[in-house]
Amino acid sequence: MRFLLIEDHPLVREGLKRLLTHTFPEGTVKEAADAREAMEQVASGPWDVIFLDIDLPDRSGLDVLHDLRNVAPASPVLILSGMLEEQFGERALEEGAAGFLSKASMMDEILTAVRRVRSGKKYISPDLGARLMEKRLNPCPKTAHEALSVREFEVLRNLGKGRTVSEIAAILGLSVKTVSTYRTRVLEKLGLHTTAEIIRYSLEHGLEK
């Protein structure tokens, strides 16, 4: 068993590492605190399970997920996040994650998710599963931000946190001009006009977490 923990908070990494080494004593756990370290580590795979924080200091977790799916397509990725599952779980699954775990998840749930994705299946929590079933049985119009592309969504989230276009460009590895273009698209698609309105929208929909 080989695990890769991509998480910038040392306490979260340590807690996961202890759980995994206790449950799988013959296993190996490697760590990465940011996207750069993650891509260096992933090349030394294969990995049975990769844990990926959706918010990394140097790049978007969803952006890293895209790279992981290309570099290590056989390694299941479990998104680990402190954000609301109803806001990000479905999008993470659509982007190729094998499952989505809240950082508040109990140990039993984490181990259940690990065993399930190792068997080639998706891990969907009961709450998210119920939400997806409800949407399938009773389709309703999507919120405006659900129609955004992955890049647009990431720009929206970062603008909602009060970050400048230059700061977002550095985090996403894009030019300032490209981020400005995405900002314009986000404003148009959400029917907004200013960054202040984006921040207010993000607060109302819990996207700033």
Image (cartoon, grey):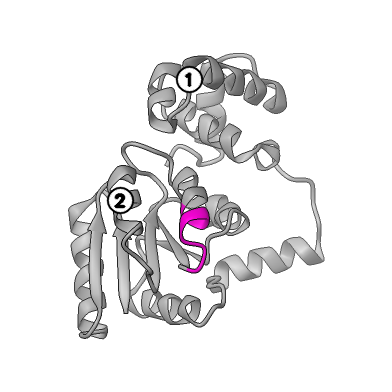
Q: Which of 22 and 70 is in front in this view?
A: 70
Query: Label 2 amino acid?
Result: Glu
Question: Residue 62 lies in magenta, yes or no?
Answer: no
Query: In the rendering, at what x and y percent does residue 141 appear?
Result: 79, 46
Where 38 falls versus 73 (above or below)? above
Question: Residue 71 lies in magenta, yes or no?
Answer: yes
Q: Nearer the viewer, mark 1 or mark 2?
A: 2
- Residue sitting at x 49%, y 80%: 116
Total count of labels = 2
Q: Are marks 1 and 2 in contact (CB under 8 Å)?
A: no
Q: Is residue 99 left or right of residue 111?
A: right
Q: Nearer the viewer, residue 153 or 169?
A: 169
Residue 129: assigned label: none
Q: Is residue 91 left or right of residue 114?
A: right
- Residue sitting at x 49%, y 47%: 62
- Residues rendered magenta in the picture: 68-74
Residue 175: assigned label: 1
Query: Label 1 amino acid?
Result: Ser
